[in-house]
Amino acid sequence: MISVVLLAALAAAFFVGWNIGSNDTANTMGTAVGGGVLRYRRAIMLMIIFVILGAVLEGFHVMKTIGKGVVVPVENARLDPVTGDPMSPFQELPMMAIVALIGAGLYVLIASTLGLPVSTSQSIVGGVIGVGLVFMFMQPNGVSAVLKFGKIGKIALCWVLTPLVAAFFAYVIYQMAARPLRRIKNVLLITRIFSALVVITAAYAAYALGANDVGNSTGVIFAAYPRLAGAGVEEFQTMQFIGLFGGVAMAIGAITYSTRVMRTVGTSITTLDAMSAFVAQFGSALTVHLFTQFGIPVSTSQAIVGGVIGAGLVKGVMAVNRRKIGHIVLAWILTPLTAAFFAFVLGVVAIEVFL
Amino acid sequence: MKVERWQICYAIIVSVGLVVGYLTHPLIGVGVILGGMLLAELFL
């Protein structure tokens, strides 16, 4: 029997996933569509396939971090009747999973309305921290939790590293690829090679996006419902199903609402020459995929900015203005703090109203 | 905003894949989505 709380939690996760799909499709497919290599419909098809593959096959890394890595049970927590492990605070009080998602989603919504580009990954980490503080200080229904500051520190460090690593990868890939490509004198052949590279990179970027970002929308759902009836009794199968759910939410976002964002955001990268656009995107996708292996939720947009900087450095030019870099630095601090504040306030209100 | 036929078609394919994934196995759901996309590419 599916409860009302589970339905509400799935709706909140779907909304966050939909947001990621509608906003980040441009980061993966912008180059291919803007450069005229793929038609919009084909780009969306490619996006859907690879985002869902990434979400199902590798989404569990970040899902575990968001759901069980930041807010952990206290020593004397109740034990899970099936596994015998201490129960996650979200499993004991699933309502707080919804609060974390709504807190982060609300912040993203307000920031987007004000025209500020913010990262969903950083917002959801903030949302989870905010709820963790509610568990620590208010102990709703006697449920307490501990915030793992070591893990939070590691995540913050990786946010700083994301654009730097993407810039490094883009720089190295440019240096490695430029020489053999320059030897080809046939213009038609070089165009075909670039077209193929752009499509392959776009697919890889979509895969990395699915693998990394699906955990943002579904991590707390997994923590609250480690076994979903019907989706299998094993935790891993549940994680794969939740990954599929998050991937489908992102796909629906791409189908329904990505056109406008693709036109506006996508242009920032398509103004680059073909080689720079390719290495910027490849470098950023490689970075996002790398951090996914460590279960770290990172910002795909900030990785792209890093990739563009790396490609520009080869020619000795700064392809991104200082204002954009300033925005990123500000976002590292402001986004998680504000989202945490939103989630904390919402959590306090939810306790007063529903418990 | 005008909704095109392919958008409805893709949305149906991923939704069916999700339901199949829930009822059977997530990877079978992914298979349904991949197969559906292939069919859509052939017939749309």
Image (spheres, rainbow, N blue to C red):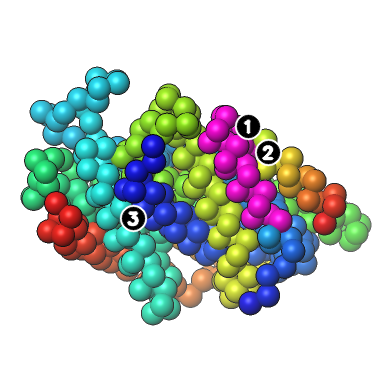
Chain at numbered mark 3: A
Which x, y percent locates residue A9?
Answer: 36, 50
| Relative vertical location of residue A208 with respect to residue A121 in this rendering, above or below | above
Same chain shared by disc 3 and disc 2? no
Image quadrant in which you'd find residue A331? bottom left
Residue in the image at 90% along x and 59% along y: A188
A262 displayed left or right of A140: right
According to the image, label 1 marks what residue? B28
Give, as a single range, the part of the protein colored magenta. B9-30
The label number, if any, that marks residue A101 in the structure image? 3
Q: Answer left or right for A90 relative to A329.
A: left
The disc placed on residue B32 is: 2
Q: How far apart are marks 2 and 1 (CA)?
A: 6 Å
> Is label 1 in a helix, a strand or a loop?
helix
Q: Indicate whether residue B15 is drawn in magenta.
A: yes
| Amino acid marked by disc 1 | Ile
Identify which residue, A86 or A335, lies in the foreground. A86
Taken as a whole, is the magenta stretch helix, strand or loop?
helix
- Badge 2 and badge 1 both on one subunit: yes
